Image (spheres, grey):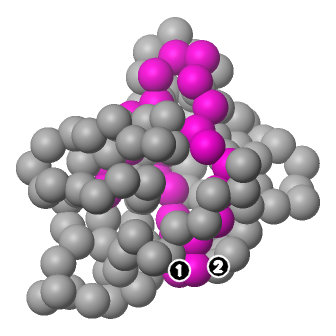
Amino acid sequence: MGDKQKQGEYLWTRERCFILELLNTDDFPEVSIARTRVEPGMITQNHSLSVLELYVIERGTGIMYLGNTRPFEVRPGDVVTIPIHASQQIRNTGEEDLEFKCICTPRFLQDCYTSQE
C-alpha cells in the first residue's frame, strides 16, 4: 500500500487512508494481510496492484470504483475481488470510518503499487 509500513501500527499513506500491516513477511511470500481505515468523506488514491487483492468489508459503507465496471456500494460482509492491474478506489460514504481487510496474493510489496493519478 502506498508508503513503507511498520508492522503493528496504523500509518497514514499517500493512498489517503490508514493502513495497519497484520501479516507481510518473507516467511509467507504467498500472502499479505492489512487492515485499512478510510475516514468519512475520503476517497483513496486511484491505483492498481500487480497482485490479486481482496477487500473484506468489516465496518462502514462506501462506493467501490473498480476498473471499467459501474461503481457499486459496499457494506460489512461484502468481499470485493480486485484483479491484477485493475484500477481501484474506494470512497467512504458513511459517517463512521470505513474499515476493511486487504488480502494480497502473492504478498504485497512496494513495487506492486502503481498510482493512476
**What x and y, as percent, mark residue 116?**
72, 56
Asked whether residue 92 is drawn in magenta, I would say no
Q: Residue drawn 32% across and 89% down?
A: 30
- Vertical arrangement, residue 84 with respect to residue 89, above or below: below
Tag 2, which secondary structure?
Answer: loop
Q: How crowded is mark 1: few (under 14 residues within 10 Å), some or many (20 or more)?
A: many
Asked whether residue 41 is drawn in magenta, I would say yes
Could one spot residue 76 in this view of the protein? no
**What x and y, as percent, mark residue 9?**
14, 43
The answer to whether mark 1 and mark 2 are in CB contact below 8 A is yes
Q: Residue drawn 64% across and 79% down?
A: 84
- Vertical arrangement, residue 110 with respect to residue 97, above or below: below
Q: Residue drawn 40% across and 70% down?
A: 110
* Residue at the disc numbered 1: 51
Question: Label 1 sits on what residue type?
Answer: Val
Disc sitting over residue 84 in the figure:
2
- Vertical arrangement, residue 82 with respect to residue 65, above or below: below
